[in-house]
């Protein structure tokens, strides 16, 4: 993997990644002349016991720009507004102009609840130069490169003193709030371990202490043995509808061996994870005959410098529930109570996805 680090005219950082050497002289463009200033901060939620980040200036961010003005499209016209340069790069990462977390955040307001600056980092990850493409449509080598990029960003961001957790994720489709046309994801580097990840880590620690192995490792073994909900079974990676799915078409993708983070993967695991992920995303689109929306989040060990033998890298993919007439989203019991109500069995939905045949060269 080759990299080229550049700085945009507004001061934001841009890193290009490629299978091939990247030549110098590449200009880091920006549609904006000045850096977007803001002071994100955290406020403590006393009833939930967790932090909430506030960045009111994000109200001004772009939402679904018209096709004729897409600042994230690659252009060879140096005068055209764009975030991305022409060249032989395959994946690009740059600082989000509307971050919810900022390494330079300071001076949180004094309120009736504890506050602190929302230090951290938010990055945009452009999966490819094809603005009409998708993650699932990328060739295997490209998805492997993207996994390498996630590992590199985890290493770089996790090394910062202000960062305790690195979360790569993708929101695909307008239905889940995507703000850009091109295939892309984001990475949030948090100053604390966020609530969902923290709860997972605690459960995993308890399970490891009691059973001598991680909870996801135990679940993966059970899913392999059952095979009922398995969508992909490789030598080093699996993809399956979990027995405890909270969404009808929820899928988890994971290495079989308990690997704590992207940075600990070997080449064989990366190759098999790429194949597992591509299989799932191709099945989604083939099942509904459309670019189906989803949220994909990758969970890994905190970057606090401590060992985390309980951690097990994996992705959880949540598409909305497709009914004959509409897409269904979370309702009152899920949002208000955090108590998920499923009106479909994971086994039935796994069977639907299993019956979708996809060909991966």
Image (tube, rainbow, N blue to C red):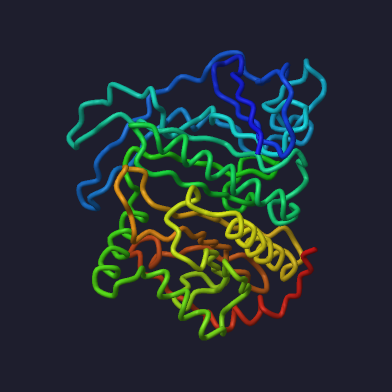
**x 73%, y 75%: residue:** 356
Q: Quadrant of residue 359?
A: bottom right
Q: Position of residue 13 (x, y in %)?
A: 56, 24
Q: Position of residue 223 (x, y in %)?
A: 50, 79
**Image quadrant for the N terminus?**
top right
Q: Is residue 139 above or below residue 94?
A: below
| Residue in the foreground of this view, choosing between 233 and 27 | 233
Judge left or right: residue 139 versus residue 193: right
Q: Is residue 323 above or below residue 303?
A: below
Q: Is residue 50 above or below residue 350?
A: above
Q: Quadrant of residue 32?
A: top right
Judge left or right: residue 83 versus residue 220: right
**x 76%, y 48%: residue:** 133
Task: Tell me how many marks there are.
Answer: 0
**x 19%, y 36%: residue:** 114
Q: Is residue 274 above or below residue 18?
A: below
**Image quadrant for the C terminus?**
bottom right
């Amino acid at each position: 993997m080759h990299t080229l680090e550049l700085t945009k005219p507004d001061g934001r950082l841009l890193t290009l990644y490629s299978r091939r050497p990247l030549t110098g002289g590449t200009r880091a463009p920006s549609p904006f002349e000045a850096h977007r200033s803001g002071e994100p901060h955290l406020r403590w939620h006393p009833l939930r016991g967790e932090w909430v980040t506030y960045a009111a200036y994000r109200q001004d961010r772009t939402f679904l720009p018209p096709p004729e003005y897409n600042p994230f499209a690659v252009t060879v016209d140096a005068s055209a507004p764009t975030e991305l340069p022409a060249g032989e790069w395959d994946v690009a990462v740059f600082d989000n102009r509307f971050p919810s977390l900022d390494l330079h955040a300071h001076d949180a307001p004094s309120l009736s609840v504890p506050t602190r600056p929302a230090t951290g980092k938010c990055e945009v990850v452009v999966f490819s130069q094809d603005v009409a493409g998708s993650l699932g449509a990328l060739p295997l080598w490209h998805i492997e490169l993207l996994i390498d990029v996630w590992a590199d960003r985890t290493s770089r961001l996790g090394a910062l003193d202000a960062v305790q957790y690195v979360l790569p994720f993708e929101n695909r489709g307008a239905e889940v709030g995507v703000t850009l046309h091109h295939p892309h994801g984001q990475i949030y580097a948090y100053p604390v371990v966020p609530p969902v990840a923290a709860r997972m880590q605690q459960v995993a620690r308890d399970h490891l202490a009691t059973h001598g192995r991680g909870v996801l490792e135990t679940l993966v073994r059970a899913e392999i043995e059952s095979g009922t909900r398995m969508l992909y079974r490789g030598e080093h990676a699996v993809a399956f509808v979990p027995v405890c799915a909270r969404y009808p078409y929820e899928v988890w993708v994971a290495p079989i061996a308990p690997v704590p983070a992207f940075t600990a993967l070997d080449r064989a695991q990366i190759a098999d994870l790429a194949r597992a992920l591509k299989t799932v995303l191709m099945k989604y689109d083939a099942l509904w005959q459309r670019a189906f929306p989803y949220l994909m989040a990758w969970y890994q060990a905190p970057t606090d410098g401590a060992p985390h033998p309980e951690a097990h890298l994996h992705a959880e993919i949540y598409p909305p529930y497709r009914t004959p007439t509409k897409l269904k989203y979370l309702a009152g019991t899920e949002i208000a109570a955090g108590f998920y109500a499923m009106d479909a069995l994971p086994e039935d939905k796994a069977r639907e996805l299993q019956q979708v045949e996809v060909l991966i060269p």
